[in-house]
Image (tube, helix red, strand yellow):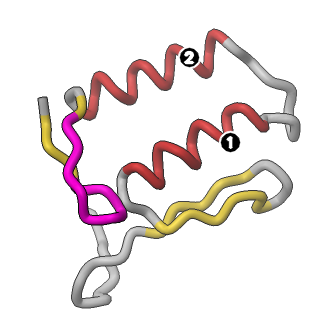
Amino acid sequence: MYARQTTRGATRKSQHPASELEAIYKDTHAHPELSMKETRTARIAETHLKTMGFEVTAGVGKTGVVGLLRNACMIPLVRR
C-alpha cells in the first residue's frame, strides 16, 4: 500500500499506482462509449485526477478532461 496526499492535505492509502491504472484501463475497455459521448470515461478520469491532487477542468471540447499539476515553486514540471 502507498500513502498519497489528497487535495485537502489528508493522506489516503491506495494500491500501487500501476495496479490502479490497470483497473481503470480494464474498466473503461469493459464499458466502451461512442466518440464524443464518453461521459462515463470522462467522469472516471476527472475523479482519478482530483484524487491525485490535480486541478481539473472538465467539459473541454465537450467530453475532454484536463488535469493541471502545480508544484510548490510554480516552476513548470518537465519530464524528459
Label 2 is placed on what type of residue?
A: Asp
Q: Secondary structure at mark 1?
A: helix
Pinpoint residue 20: horizontal percent, then vertical percent.
34, 27
Above or below, comparing residue 78 to residue 72 in the picture: above
* Residue at 58% in and 49% down: 46
Q: CA distance from mark 2 to mark 1?
A: 13 Å
Residue 7 left/right relative to 59? left
Q: Is residue 15 magenta?
A: no
Residue 52 against residue 22 in the figure, above or below = below
Image quadrant of residue 34? top right
Q: Which residues are magenta?
A: 5-13
79 vs 5: above or below: below
User: Could you say which disc has been placed on residue 42 in the image?
Assistant: 1
The correct choice, above or below, for 63 with respect to 79 in the image is: above
Q: Position of residue 55 (x, y in %)?
A: 49, 68
In the image, taking residue 19 as reference, residue 35 lies left or right, namely: right
Q: Position of residue 4 (x, y in %)?
A: 20, 48
Q: Which mark is residue 71?
A: none
Q: Residue 13 is drawn in which quadrant?
A: top left
* Residue at (72, 32) in percent of width and height: 40
Total numbered labels placed on residues in the image:
2
Q: Say which of 55 and 33 sits in front.
A: 55
The residue that appears at 29% across and 87% down in the rendered structure is 75
- Residue 14 point in image, percent of width and height: 24, 33
Q: Quadrant of the N terminus?
A: top left
Q: Secondary structure at mark 2?
A: helix
How crowded pointer 1 is (Cα within 10 Å; few <14, some 14-19, many 20+) is rated as some
Q: Tell me the amino acid under the disc marked 1.
A: Ala
- Of the two numbered discs 2 and 1 on the same chain, state the one appearing first in sequence: 2
Judging by the rendered image, the residue that carries numbered circle 2 is 27
